[in-house]
Image (tube, rainbow, N blue to C red):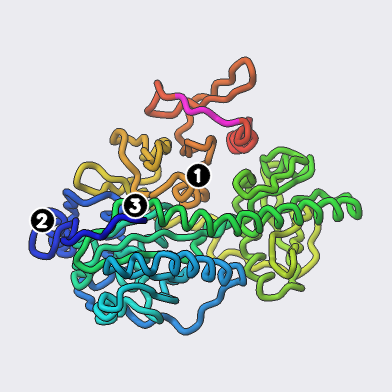
Amino acid sequence: MRERYRGGPKSDGPGKGTVYSAWERFVHGEDDVHGVRPEVAISWHRCREQYRVDPYLTEAPVAVAEVDHTPEHDVVFAELGFRAASVAHEVGNAGGIVTVTDATGRILAEWGDQATRTIAADCNLAPWYCWSEYAAGTNGMGTALEAHAPVMVRGAEHWCQAFHSWACAGVAVRDVVTREPIAVLNISCWRSQLPASVGAWLMNAARKTQCTLTRRARDGGAELVAAYNNARARSSAPLAAVDTAGKVVIADDTTSVLLGVPGSTPAVDPTVRWKPGLPELIGAARYASTQAARNPDWIGSTQIFTHLADEPTPIGIRPVFLSGHLVGHLVSFGVSDGEQLPQPEGAPHSPAQPRRVVATRDNRMVLLRLSEVSFAESEGNDVWLATDQGQLRAASPGLDKLDSELADAGFLRVHRRYVVNLSRIREVERRLKGELFLIMDGEATKMVPVSRRNAPAVRRALDI
């Protein structure tokens, strides 16, 4: 990162420019975001509609006192601190500052130019203060927690007017299993530009930090497979091993049919694990992860519905640890030992709250009903939606994030590049070598491929 910071803000300053004009309109209730980058526009939408952040806030609030995290988070904080310290002198000479925050947006440490740090202190851009979007609106740290790629927020792109003199760039380091954010590395400049190389440097720093988490997750996957093999030798009950996010690491031939995943095929690497075709199982595994992290002796049980029976099937959940660290669970079908998991609140058939998918068209945000979306396709860093209104760019920063948001709403990942609305599938074509292609309602000329890895889940979801 050898480029010098140059004087003069790159984006619009207060009182001038298209971004500031759009900001003025948006904070007063209009939806015209002409000239605003999509990732910034959707952040503004969260700040105004979801978090209700005061755009005239002048300083960030004090961070919450109680923060609960695992030792892996401490490893990430230390690694990012090393990365930040390695460029602190260069950034400081250029008049910038480097910060590290935790998953709540709380600034843990700060390095860089002392004069800039003094200015930053006036708006609480300093340790012990919270810079999540919920607390401080659109900014490099808070918006990075919401995104799955490096973000830049310059000048009037900040939600709060008091921060319009700043330019910030941040990247989040995420848990490779749950995809939840752990920390953010951020660089900020006051009334000057960020260098063109800042995004690449941040991404490289995050990638190197994440390598440690990936190795740890692979070790956890291997431990789950070993625990599964030991349990199989002692019991004939149908069995699966899932990670802390509920993804399948390995399942026997009987259980694999219930889950819609390949049988007896280990997936040690976290990037190739399978999402089971039973949302109730994912929810149970995540609840079990929360309980077992607090009490290592916890064992639970519940009942879930499968596609092969009209009555719920009991399952037992037993946590698996590696060096005191929770890595996942063994799930036994037909077993009901342990503490009963609480049932979800509300009647099973109570009407669901209406949900929307946010897209962008020109200078406006488009709020789509789920039924209007046929499928989503990733293209580089962009996600495009095939909708009843034509092709629109999704506001979601990545297909993985969109997949996680819509997994319990009738959408299914069928390929690394595609997520489809199951209710919009009209035809399924099977070719000579067994490849599946989906013909979607409203997109008769568009055939969505199904990867071999996802084919069992598709067959399961469609009962074919």
Give the residue type that dot 2 points to: Gly
Q: Is residue 277 visible?
A: no
Numbered disc in front, either 3 or 2 = 3
Label 3 sits on residue: 197
Q: Residue at x 50, y 54 (%)?
A: 207
Distance from disc 2 to disc 1, alpha carbons, whole Å, reads: 42 Å
First to last magenta residue range: 447-451
Give yes or no for contact between labels 3 and 2 (Cβ–Cβ under 8 Å): no
Quick one: quadrant of the N terminus? bottom left
Mark-to-mark CA distance, 1 and 3 = 40 Å
| First of labels 1, 3 by sequence position | 3
Q: Residues within 10 Å of mark 2 (few under 14, many from 20)?
A: few
User: Disc 1 marks which amino acid?
Assistant: Gly
Give the number of the mark in front: 2 or 1: 2
Please give the residue where the numbered disc 1 appears in the rendered image.
410
Report if residue 57 lies within the magenta region: no
Residue 216: image quadrant is bottom right
Left or right of residue 430: residue 62: left
Q: Is 110 placed above or below 352 here?
A: below
For mark 3, does the 10 Å Cα neighbourhood hold few (<14), some (14 to 19), or many (20 or more) residues?
few
Residue 339 higher or lower than 405, as above or below: below
Would residue 230 appear left or right of 460 to someone viewing this image? Answer: right
The structure residue drawn at horizontal position 73% and vertical position 66%, both measured from the top left corner, is: 300
Quarter of the image that includes the C terminus: top right
